[in-house]
Image (cartoon, grey):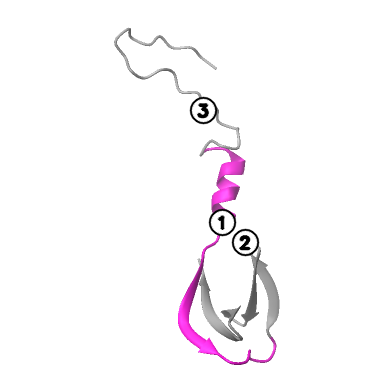
Amino acid sequence: MTSTTVPELSVVADAQAVVGRPATPGSAAGVARRTTRRVIRRSTTYVNALPKGCVRTSVNGVTVWRCGPTYYQPYQGRYVVVYIN
């Protein structure tokens, strides 16, 4: 790490971020964290029963059912179509 001189009247000190640490944006851990984070958004489409051939899976610790390209989440005795981004 190189040291730089900070002017006397500067209000900004040296940056403390080090590439390679998990909290820095350029690190492998930071990139992996951003690419694996998913958002589940509910739609307004509900069904009483799932189509045949659905597979139970987990997204960010939330149980959802994948039926082909469509995902469903249990909600108050029915299933709501959800979008995973």
How many angstroms separate mark 3 from mark 2 (CA)? 28 Å
Query: Measuring 32% from the left and 7% from the top, which residue is drawn there?
Result: 8
Image height check: is 47 above or below 18? Answer: below
Task: Give the label on residue 60, or none.
Answer: 2
Q: Quadrant of residue 21?
A: top right
Mark 3 vs 2: CB contact within 8 A: no
Q: Nearer the viewer, mark 1 or mark 2?
A: 2
Q: Which stretch did the figure color magenta?
A: 26-53
Task: Give the label on residue 17, or none.
Answer: 3
Mark 1 vs 2: CB contact within 8 A: yes
Disc 3 is placed on an element classified as loop
Image coords of residue 10 (percent x, y): 31, 14
Crowd rating for badge 2 (residues with CA inside 10 Å; few <14, some 14–19, many 20+): few
Image coords of residue 38 (percent x, y): 55, 61
Image height check: is 63 above or below 45? Answer: above
Which of disc 1 and disc 3 is earlier in sequence?
3
